[in-house]
């Protein structure tokens, strides 16, 4: 099953507290079971910050339907 999260161009995820963070846990990340709900939330966030470059990302759902967030690529 997939869940949908919001991610900006800096690979930060939107949290439930409406903060963009890259060091958050799956329990803190805003996620939706429905893509249209996630798109609506993206539009609301974009209305507050028109310069925001964010997208809806599909992730696999883990325990308790929390997203399994992709690991960051290291620049080595």
Image (cartoon, rainbow, N blue to C red):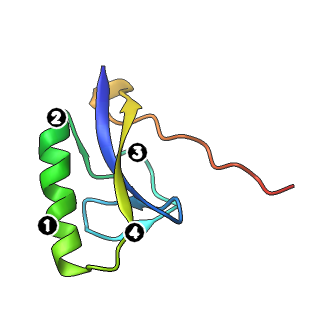
Which is nearer the N-term, disc 1 or disc 2? 2
Residue positioned 27% across, 52% down in the render: 30
Which is nearer the N-term, disc 3 or disc 2? 3
Residue positioned 53% across, 66% down in the render: 10
Q: Which numbered circle lies on residue 1? A: none
Q: How far separated are the C-alphas under marks 1 and 4? A: 14 Å
Number of marks drawn: 4
Between disc 1 and disc 4, the foreground one is 1
Callout 4: SS:
strand
* Residue hosting label 3: 26
Q: How far separated are the C-alphas under marks 2 and 4? A: 21 Å
Callout 2: SS:
loop
Between disc 1 and disc 3, the foreground one is 1
User: Horizontal and vertical percent for residue 62?
Assistant: 39, 26
User: Horizontal and vertical percent for residue 68?
Assistant: 45, 34
Q: How far separated are the C-alphas under marks 3 and 2? A: 17 Å
Q: Are marks 1 and 2 in contact (CB under 8 Å)?
A: no
Q: Which numbered circle lies on residue 20? A: 4
Callout 3 crowding tier (Cα within 10 Å): few <14, some 14–19, many ≥20 = some
* Residue hosting label 2: 34
């Amino acid at each position: 099953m997939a869940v949908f999260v919001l991610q900006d161009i800096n690979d930060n995820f939107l949290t439930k507290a409406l903060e963009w963070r890259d060091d958050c846990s799956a329990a803190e990340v805003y996620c939706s079971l429905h893509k249209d709900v996630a798109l609506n939330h993206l539009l609301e966030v974009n209305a507050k910050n028109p310069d925001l470059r964010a997208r809806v990302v599909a992730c696999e759902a883990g325990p308790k339907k929390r997203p399994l967030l992709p690991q960051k690529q290291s620049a080595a």
